Image (cartoon, rainbow, N blue to C red):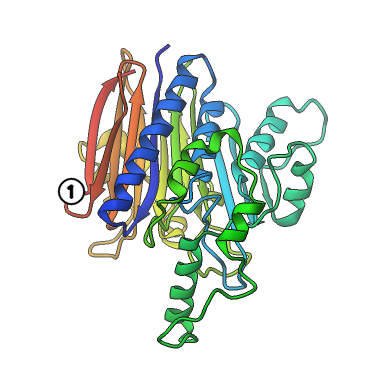
Amino acid sequence: MPHIVAVHTGAGNCSHETNKLLKILCKSVCSEVSALLAGGRSATDAAVAGSLLLEDSPLTNAGLGSSITDDKKTRTEASICSTVSGFHCAGDLENVRHPIKIVEMMARDTLENTSQYIPPRIMVGQSAIDRYSQKDAVICQTNICTKRSIKMFYKAEKYFNGKLPAKRRKVDPEIKDPDEIKKEVSFSESSKIASNHEKEEGPDGVEDTVGVVCIDSTGDITCATSSGGSVYKYSGRLGQCCTHGAGSYTTPSLGIVTTGNGEQIINKLIAVTVAHKLPYCADPCAALDACFQHKESRMCGFVAVEKGEEGVATVHVQHTLTNMVVGFMSAQMEAPVVRVVTREAPVFIETVRM
């Protein structure tokens, strides 16, 4: 069945070794999601499955290993933007490893609603957790810190507040040690990729939102995003996942997901702006340029998949950050294409048959 999936693991200042692990992860996610689409699953089902795999990896800033807030918590968020169900998101979800599952059920409630009550498209905080944890055991609150996220927290605390001495103290008792976390965390079947990489987790890594774009055999398009937010963020802060047209957007022929500085992405509404400019630009740079004034600082990137005529799709990638791992796979491809897009080569375009 014709289809295509594109995945990015978020932008970050990653070492060569970490990028190698992210490429392995990205390739695995593309392969598994492509197999689901080939089997007739919907774009939304496939995008959620891909997001779950990314959330289960300690290499990403989504789900397990999400950034720690200024009050020493982890608060995750996610979104689904679909040509079928529209936009849904949930945010400020304390210690929730799979925020994408909450959003998936919100989207399902909208599609299956037969009452006069209109289901919500945006939910935040404990109310969202309580409502949907009753429906799916996967949605639970558990310690999702990792050694990398703890290290990044202390680094940020020192940077913003100058609280720490030159020689960093041991892990704060309010932030559980990762060895204890491993005893508490219950891995789902979709965490096999993550468990293979967890022991190889490096000190650096991705700091931004992850994203998946799927086009299924019927032509429906779904974008899914998931994030732990910026390190040392304020509790209660919502990022681009929770803003329609910022973190993701769909048109009848295109799906786009963004990553980078959430406040800038929200302020500029990067996803919707690029989505409406990109089909008329030969270069993705021109579409991103439309979001900014001349010489204005840029801290963002995007992955877009544009559906063309006669079963052709074009993958557009651009970012202004240090590096970002991106992969894609269509029904006509024997294996995924995975690349590290760097600051030196920030633009990538490829057209493939679906």
Q: Is residue 276 left or right of residue 185?
A: left
User: Eyeballing the image, is 110 above or below 239?
Assistant: above
Quarter residue 308 falls in: top left
Q: Is residue 288 left or right of residue 185?
A: left
Amino acid type for the residue under numbered disc 1: Ala
Q: Is residue 71 left or right of residue 208?
A: right
In the rendering, at what x and y percent does residue 54 appear? Answer: 48, 42
Residue at image x 40%, y 14%?
A: 2
User: Eyeballing the image, is 276 above or below 164?
Assistant: above
Residue at image x 40%, y 86%?
A: 166
Quarter residue 4 falls in: top left
Q: Residues within 10 Å of mark 1 (few under 14, many from 20)?
A: few
Q: How many marks?
A: 1
Q: Is residue 274 left or right of residue 211?
A: left
In the rendering, at what x and y percent does residue 332 appear? Answer: 31, 15
In the rendering, at what x and y percent does residue 350 appear? Answer: 23, 30
- Residue sticking out furthest to the left: 344
Residue at image x 51%, y 25%?
A: 43
What is the quadrant of the C terminus in the image? Answer: top left
Q: Considering depth in this image, is 333 or 241 the residue closer to the camera?
A: 333
**What residue does disc 1 label?**
345
Instruction: Assign a secondary structure to mark 1.
Output: loop
Q: Considering depth in this image, is 74 or 15 the residue closer to the camera?
A: 15
User: Eyeballing the image, is 64 above or below 298?
Assistant: above
What is the quadrant of the N terminus in the image? Answer: top left
In the rendering, at what x and y percent does residue 271 appear? Answer: 42, 45
Q: Considering depth in this image, is 14 or 118 the residue closer to the camera?
A: 14
Residue 219 seen: no
Quarter residue 340 falls in: top left
Residue 138 seen: yes
